[in-house]
Image (cartoon, rainbow, N blue to C red):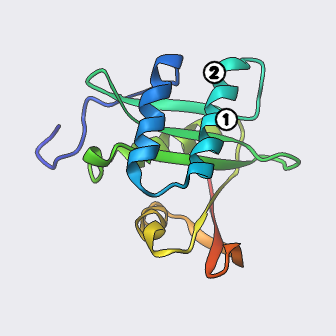
Amino acid sequence: MNKNGRISALKIRRMVREDRGAILEILSQSGKFTADEIGIARELIDIWLDKQEQKDYLIFTAELEGRAAGYVCFGPTPATCATWDVYWIAVAEDLHGRGIGGKLLLFAEEEIASRGGRMVIIETSSTQKYSPARGFYEKKGYAVEARIRDFYRAGDDRLIYTRRI
Protein backbone atom coordinates (compact mmCIF):
# COMPACT_ATOMS: atom_id res chain seq x y z
CA MET A 1 0.00 0.00 0.00
CA ASN A 2 1.30 3.47 -0.81
CA LYS A 3 1.03 6.62 1.33
CA ASN A 4 -2.43 7.42 -0.10
CA GLY A 5 -3.85 4.07 1.07
CA ARG A 6 -3.91 2.78 -2.50
CA ILE A 7 -2.92 -0.74 -3.39
CA SER A 8 0.40 -0.98 -5.21
CA ALA A 9 1.02 -4.77 -5.26
CA LEU A 10 -2.30 -5.75 -6.83
CA LYS A 11 -2.23 -8.49 -9.45
CA ILE A 12 -5.12 -9.02 -11.87
CA ARG A 13 -5.23 -12.49 -13.36
CA ARG A 14 -7.63 -14.99 -14.90
CA MET A 15 -9.99 -16.44 -12.32
CA VAL A 16 -9.14 -19.98 -11.27
CA ARG A 17 -11.21 -22.56 -9.41
CA GLU A 18 -9.45 -21.78 -6.11
CA ASP A 19 -10.89 -18.23 -6.25
CA ARG A 20 -14.53 -19.38 -6.46
CA GLY A 21 -15.30 -19.60 -2.74
CA ALA A 22 -13.59 -16.33 -1.87
CA ILE A 23 -15.39 -14.42 -4.63
CA LEU A 24 -18.79 -15.84 -3.66
CA GLU A 25 -18.02 -14.87 -0.05
CA ILE A 26 -17.19 -11.30 -1.16
CA LEU A 27 -20.57 -11.12 -2.91
CA SER A 28 -22.43 -12.57 0.10
CA GLN A 29 -20.74 -10.34 2.66
CA SER A 30 -21.33 -7.16 0.68
CA GLY A 31 -24.99 -7.03 1.69
CA LYS A 32 -25.77 -5.49 -1.70
CA PHE A 33 -26.80 -8.57 -3.65
CA THR A 34 -29.86 -10.77 -3.27
CA ALA A 35 -29.62 -14.55 -3.12
CA ASP A 36 -30.89 -14.67 -6.72
CA GLU A 37 -28.21 -12.22 -7.88
CA ILE A 38 -25.49 -14.22 -6.14
CA GLY A 39 -26.91 -17.32 -7.81
CA ILE A 40 -26.49 -15.65 -11.19
CA ALA A 41 -22.90 -14.68 -10.36
CA ARG A 42 -22.24 -18.28 -9.27
CA GLU A 43 -23.68 -19.55 -12.56
CA LEU A 44 -21.42 -17.26 -14.62
CA ILE A 45 -18.39 -18.22 -12.54
CA ASP A 46 -19.15 -21.90 -13.03
CA ILE A 47 -19.58 -21.43 -16.78
CA TRP A 48 -16.18 -19.70 -16.86
CA LEU A 49 -14.52 -22.44 -14.83
CA ASP A 50 -16.22 -25.48 -16.38
CA LYS A 51 -16.68 -24.57 -20.03
CA GLN A 52 -13.35 -23.38 -21.35
CA GLU A 53 -14.72 -23.25 -24.90
CA GLN A 54 -17.38 -20.63 -24.08
CA LYS A 55 -16.85 -17.10 -25.41
CA ASP A 56 -19.59 -15.23 -23.53
CA TYR A 57 -17.78 -14.34 -20.30
CA LEU A 58 -14.30 -13.33 -19.18
CA ILE A 59 -13.62 -13.35 -15.44
CA PHE A 60 -10.54 -11.98 -13.73
CA THR A 61 -9.55 -11.92 -10.07
CA ALA A 62 -7.78 -9.10 -8.26
CA GLU A 63 -5.22 -10.74 -6.00
CA LEU A 64 -3.58 -8.94 -3.12
CA GLU A 65 -0.97 -10.65 -0.98
CA GLY A 66 -2.18 -14.09 -2.07
CA ARG A 67 -5.82 -13.28 -1.33
CA ALA A 68 -8.70 -12.84 -3.78
CA ALA A 69 -9.57 -9.19 -3.17
CA GLY A 70 -12.23 -8.79 -5.86
CA TYR A 71 -13.24 -9.70 -9.37
CA VAL A 72 -14.64 -8.46 -12.64
CA CYS A 73 -16.85 -10.34 -15.11
CA PHE A 74 -17.46 -8.98 -18.61
CA GLY A 75 -18.21 -10.17 -22.11
CA PRO A 76 -19.29 -9.21 -25.61
CA THR A 77 -22.92 -8.18 -25.89
CA PRO A 78 -24.76 -10.71 -28.06
CA ALA A 79 -25.96 -9.55 -31.50
CA THR A 80 -23.91 -6.33 -31.44
CA CYS A 81 -20.78 -5.14 -33.18
CA ALA A 82 -18.05 -4.32 -30.64
CA THR A 83 -20.32 -3.57 -27.65
CA TRP A 84 -19.41 -5.22 -24.36
CA ASP A 85 -21.16 -5.63 -21.00
CA VAL A 86 -19.48 -5.40 -17.61
CA TYR A 87 -21.67 -7.73 -15.57
CA TRP A 88 -19.98 -7.71 -12.18
CA ILE A 89 -17.35 -5.81 -10.25
CA ALA A 90 -17.01 -6.65 -6.59
CA VAL A 91 -14.31 -5.90 -4.02
CA ALA A 92 -13.97 -7.22 -0.47
CA GLU A 93 -15.64 -4.80 1.92
CA ASP A 94 -12.49 -4.30 4.01
CA LEU A 95 -10.63 -3.15 0.89
CA HIS A 96 -13.13 -0.57 -0.40
CA GLY A 97 -11.74 2.87 -1.19
CA ARG A 98 -8.27 1.63 -2.08
CA GLY A 99 -8.56 1.73 -5.85
CA ILE A 100 -9.14 -1.97 -6.51
CA GLY A 101 -12.51 -1.46 -8.20
CA GLY A 102 -11.04 1.24 -10.42
CA LYS A 103 -8.15 -1.02 -11.40
CA LEU A 104 -10.55 -3.85 -12.21
CA LEU A 105 -12.70 -1.57 -14.36
CA LEU A 106 -9.69 -0.12 -16.16
CA PHE A 107 -8.37 -3.65 -16.74
CA ALA A 108 -11.74 -4.68 -18.24
CA GLU A 109 -11.80 -1.60 -20.47
CA GLU A 110 -8.27 -2.29 -21.71
CA GLU A 111 -9.12 -5.94 -22.41
CA ILE A 112 -12.28 -4.89 -24.24
CA ALA A 113 -10.37 -2.34 -26.33
CA SER A 114 -7.68 -4.92 -27.16
CA ARG A 115 -10.45 -7.16 -28.52
CA GLY A 116 -11.88 -4.44 -30.73
CA GLY A 117 -14.55 -3.22 -28.33
CA ARG A 118 -15.88 0.29 -28.80
CA MET A 119 -18.56 0.65 -26.11
CA VAL A 120 -19.04 -0.61 -22.57
CA ILE A 121 -22.45 -1.08 -20.94
CA ILE A 122 -22.99 -1.36 -17.19
CA GLU A 123 -26.45 -1.83 -15.72
CA THR A 124 -27.40 -1.19 -12.11
CA SER A 125 -30.28 -0.42 -9.80
CA SER A 126 -31.59 3.01 -8.89
CA THR A 127 -32.05 2.13 -5.20
CA GLN A 128 -30.15 3.91 -2.44
CA LYS A 129 -27.91 0.94 -1.64
CA TYR A 130 -26.46 1.19 -5.18
CA SER A 131 -25.69 4.90 -4.86
CA PRO A 132 -21.95 4.25 -4.23
CA ALA A 133 -21.77 2.06 -7.35
CA ARG A 134 -23.45 4.75 -9.45
CA GLY A 135 -21.05 7.38 -8.12
CA PHE A 136 -18.13 5.09 -8.93
CA TYR A 137 -19.29 4.59 -12.55
CA GLU A 138 -19.90 8.31 -13.04
CA LYS A 139 -16.46 9.14 -11.62
CA LYS A 140 -14.97 6.71 -14.15
CA GLY A 141 -16.61 8.49 -17.09
CA TYR A 142 -19.83 6.50 -17.48
CA ALA A 143 -23.12 8.27 -18.11
CA VAL A 144 -26.72 7.12 -17.79
CA GLU A 145 -27.90 6.34 -21.30
CA ALA A 146 -31.29 4.93 -20.32
CA ARG A 147 -33.63 4.37 -17.40
CA ILE A 148 -36.30 1.70 -17.34
CA ARG A 149 -38.70 2.62 -14.57
CA ASP A 150 -39.82 -0.09 -12.14
CA PHE A 151 -37.71 -2.68 -13.97
CA TYR A 152 -36.52 -4.76 -11.01
CA ARG A 153 -39.60 -4.05 -8.89
CA ALA A 154 -41.86 -1.07 -8.21
CA GLY A 155 -39.64 1.90 -7.36
CA ASP A 156 -36.44 0.17 -8.50
CA ASP A 157 -35.37 1.39 -11.92
CA ARG A 158 -32.78 -0.20 -14.19
CA LEU A 159 -30.07 2.35 -15.05
CA ILE A 160 -27.99 1.65 -18.11
CA TYR A 161 -24.59 3.35 -18.10
CA THR A 162 -22.39 3.60 -21.17
CA ARG A 163 -18.89 4.68 -22.02
CA ARG A 164 -17.28 4.71 -25.43
CA ILE A 165 -13.68 3.54 -25.46
Q: Is residue 131 visible?
A: yes
Q: Residues within 10 Å of mark 2 (few under 14, many from 20)?
A: some
Q: Amino acid at mark 1?
A: Glu
- Tell me how far mark 2 sits from mark 1, CA to CA: 10 Å
Q: Which residue is mark 1?
A: 43
The x and y percentages for residue 160 are: 66, 67
Residue toward you, 111 or 93: 93
Q: Residues within 10 Å of mark 1 (few under 14, many from 20)?
A: few
Q: What residue is at 70 percent from the left and 27 percent from the top?
A: 47
Left or right: 159 as drawn, with respect to 116: left
The residue at the far front in this view is 35
Q: Is residue 71 above or below residue 81?
A: above
Q: What residue is at 52 percent from the left and 19 percent from the top?
A: 16
Quadrant placement of the N terminus: top left
Q: Is residue 151 above or below residue 51?
A: below
The x and y percentages for residue 49 are: 63, 21
Q: Is residue 4 above or below residue 50?
A: below
Q: Are marks 2 and 1 in contact (CB under 8 Å)?
A: no
Residue toward you, 38 or 2: 38
**Circle 2 sits in a helix, a strand or a loop, which is it?**
helix
Residue toward you, 70 or 31: 31
Q: Is residue 164 above or below residue 61?
A: below
Front position among marks 2 and 1: 1
Q: Which residue is mark 2?
A: 49
The x and y percentages for residue 13 are: 47, 24
The label on residue 86 is: none
Left or right: 99 as drawn, with respect to 81: left
Specify which label sits upstream in the sequence, 2 or 1. 1
Q: Amino acid at mark 2?
A: Leu
Residue toward you, 90 or 76: 90
Q: What residue is at 59 percent from the left and 39 percent from the top?
A: 73
